[in-house]
Amino acid sequence: MAALRVGTRAVEGRFQASNGGGGGGGGMAPSSRLVAAHREAKPRSSHSAAPWKLPRRRGGAMPLWRVAVFASVALNVATLALLLHHYATSPPHHYHDAGLTTRSSDAAAHRRARTASSMAPSTGKPAVTTDSVINLDHGDPTMFEEFWRETGDAAEVVIPGWQTMSYFSDVTNVCWFLEPELDRQVRRLHRVVGNAAVDGYHVLVGTGSTQLFMAALYALAPDHSAAAAGDAGEPISVVSTAPYYSSYPAVTDFLRSGLFRWAGDADAFGGDSYIELVCSPNNPDGAIREAVLDSKTGNGRTVHDLAYYWPQYTPITKRAAHDIMLFTVSKSTGHAGTRIGWALVKDRAIARKMTKFVELNTIGVSKDSQMRAAKVLAAVSDGYERRPEQTKETKTATPPRLFDFGRRKMVERWSMLRAAVAASGIFSLPEETSGFCNFTKVTAATNPGMI
Amino acid sequence: MAALRVGTRAVEGRFQASNGGGGGGGGMAPSSRLVAAHREAKPRSSHSAAPWKLPRRRGGAMPLWRVAVFASVALNVATLALLLHHYATSPPHHYHDAGLTTRSSDAAAHRRARTASSMAPSTGKPAVTTDSVINLDHGDPTMFEEFWRETGDAAEVVIPGWQTMSYFSDVTNVCWFLEPELDRQVRRLHRVVGNAAVDGYHVLVGTGSTQLFMAALYALAPDHSAAAAGDAGEPISVVSTAPYYSSYPAVTDFLRSGLFRWAGDADAFGGDSYIELVCSPNNPDGAIREAVLDSKTGNGRTVHDLAYYWPQYTPITKRAAHDIMLFTVSKSTGHAGTRIGWALVKDRAIARKMTKFVELNTIGVSKDSQMRAAKVLAAVSDGYERRPEQTKETKTATPPRLFDFGRRKMVERWSMLRAAVAASGIFSLPEETSGFCNFTKVTAATNPGMI
């Protein structure tokens, strides 16, 4: 998706023009619609103009822009080819048959058939055809669907009608709406992968990591409670090194909060009081990032968005241990539709304020999706932690391994892209970087998330 | 919950005092924690002080305050009694056994057992014991769990690991992340009950109705896009006739939006540009409400919160057909943990802006919970629409009927409360009102939601 984001950010102006009068933008991407949506509300606001100021401010940006547009086209051509293949081999409407033929008992088949027939879910975007128009605009992790079809019941959840009706999950936890099983599986997976420290951290759940991103801004913004009427005190500046994920400015400013405000490129920021967003691997360019600002007054805070810090996208070179780290199942396992993200937070007071945000915003997070995410994360860990009972239940000797599958797909797509780019001769791509992965124990290339 | 809300609102100052330093308030109620959370952020802001200005402004408010405190105590005593009974008869930890004994096949039993063991969900708040401290503070719809245990598989969902992974549900719909099946079942239930018009309305889904409440404020606030930097233009006033739901001011102001700001009691509002929140039946007092403001400049908007406009709480006297109507499964079916709310919106442009809010805020809504909510709403409609295939599958001749069950419970609890109030002799309750219900075809009393 990172590469697609390049396209998104680089050409968002044009998309806004073509989508401005669109029908709700159903066919548009989450990320770019964030921008489009926002521009519709206030097209001349400072932050949405930022991407356009960028080139003028930084000489090196124009080549990147051209590369971005062409790269996006190439990436999407490659994606479409893969999707065509994907849809041809596993069309969503085969679900009912599959459900029935794999049933091992009439009763189960009966219930499954009834469930399937009455609950046939949407299948996401329509299948790609030769008539499809290339959309530079969005990513959607359907790439992983093939893997999860192979896992069978391992990641299936059954939820009785009377289950998890309460608002509460664990009244003893700072995050009182976090399902204990999700807490366990999040910590377990991070220990298995070694990409983030969990001991001494609070696990918070959000409706996708976007909600936790807003929660972090809310929690880190200075508390002006001493001021009357709540108007005093300038909003804190939110910055990130360019090129940054196009939804950061949109999500920061769409409600015009008096607590925080988008201030653009961290490299060009002069102040000393700020919230710096560090996205690593970075969306859109996949670069490994570190914080670039250092507050002398101690009024600087950082939020690390590690959505792509998983073995299928980049070598796991160290166990991250920052104050606030954000993750999401959309990028780690491909379950974007469950809208489950999580944050690892060191400080209890910050964790409590972030929890308050989610509570004020949505009074908690879907328990159904939390249970499903826990099951999915467990299946991923099981693939690498061979446990006795697991071996019995699994049909194959080696259980399906998500990160191996994901890396194969990414390598496949990037080689197609690099071939397309080389053939064109018109433009270039960033050089391939690699490093030793502590998880796979081999030196691996970086494959920016293109899903 | 309404009655509990009286307690919440009336004593929130005290709760704030006792909870200010609490540990994240795990044991606190959504609604009152909204207030507590907000006050922690800016205790002297105008809106959170509103409840205290109220008594000074309106002479009749003090008696209400006393009634409220005592009523809450009585209500919770009654609630505790019922909960004790409820937990004694159906303790959550019986789930595994139940799951196994009701299986109709080994395979299913095996899968269910595995699912249950690996996915045992939280059971919400700990069971009430004789040592339990009375909490005036929160409501939780566990009252309905008993009903859903009786429905068996009718409201059960099975979600394979590969299902609904995409961000998108229906790219042709204004609300592109709404599952078509939920759209169908929402319209079907409103037609069955006759409490709201659906023809010519857009159905939008949210992470609980709270998110849609914020979405409505975002969509109805004036568009200051013509102004530079997006700072110009005063935030629009958000008002509601007192006594109002304590979370309205908290949710409106916690981000200090430049788009909208809480302005207190609608009856005391002098302006002509506003968003009036009409909660009917009203939380906290169960009163049937109409909009009280009438804008001469046409800059007044209304949002109708009809969370409690269901047959178990009040007679369905007419088919509501307002511009924006909010509903939630938390109050209609008791599934608070799924966090699914919906809005019926007449205007397409407003529906599109509300959709944009949800997209910017959480990039859609859990598909798993949407599928579950669709299944649950379908089970409720099935209870009143006898369909052939339904009759075959249902064990009893008459399928379980949610609203009948709910009304019995409410009548039971209110009679206990009125008895307790009469016995005390210290205070009084609003007189019982009643009306002819177009749904049940009988004259029924109003039973403000106490769940």
Image (cartoon, coloured by chain):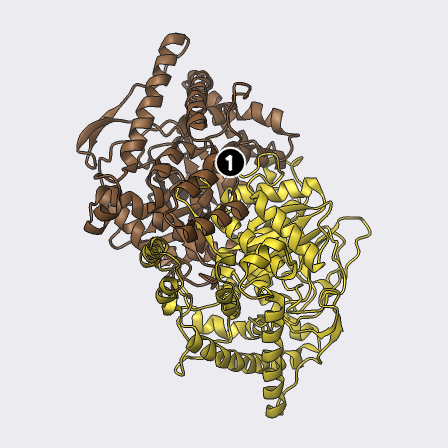
Chain colours: A yellow, B brown
Task: Judge left or right: residue A431 versus residue B205.
Answer: right
Write the residue at 33% across / 51% down.
B345
Where residue B391 appears, as percent x and y from the top left, is 21, 46
Is residue A238 visible to the viewer in this orientation of the structure? yes
The percent position of residue A152, horizontal first and vertical second, equals 48, 62
Q: Residue at x 65, y 55 (%)?
A: A189
Q: Quadrant of the N terminus of chain B?
A: top left
Relative to B21, does residue B66 appear above or below in the rendering?
above
The percent coordinates of residue B180 (x first, y second) are 34, 58
Regarding residue B197, the answer to whether it shows in the image is no
Q: Quadrant of the C terminus of chain B?
A: top left
User: Which is nearer the eye, A41 or B191?
Assistant: B191
> How far across and down, in percent of the image, does residue A248 sit?
60, 60
Quarter of the image for residue A225 reads: top right
Comparing A349 with B147, the one in front is B147
Secondary structure at badge 1 equals: loop
Label 1: how many Cα within 10 Å (few below 14, some 14–19, many 20+): many
Q: What residue would you read off at disc 1?
A: B124
Could you tell whether A13 is left or right of B105 in the image?
A: right
- Name which quarter of the figure residue B317 lies in: top left
- Decide: is A402 above or below A160: below
Compared with A380, B113 (above or below) is above
Q: How many marks?
A: 1
Q: Is residue A381 left or right of residue A12?
A: right
Q: Which residue is depicted at the point 67% across and 70% down? A: A286
Image height of A340 relative to B281, above or below: below
- Give whichever of A130, B397 is nearer the camera: B397
Amino acid under disc 1:
Gly
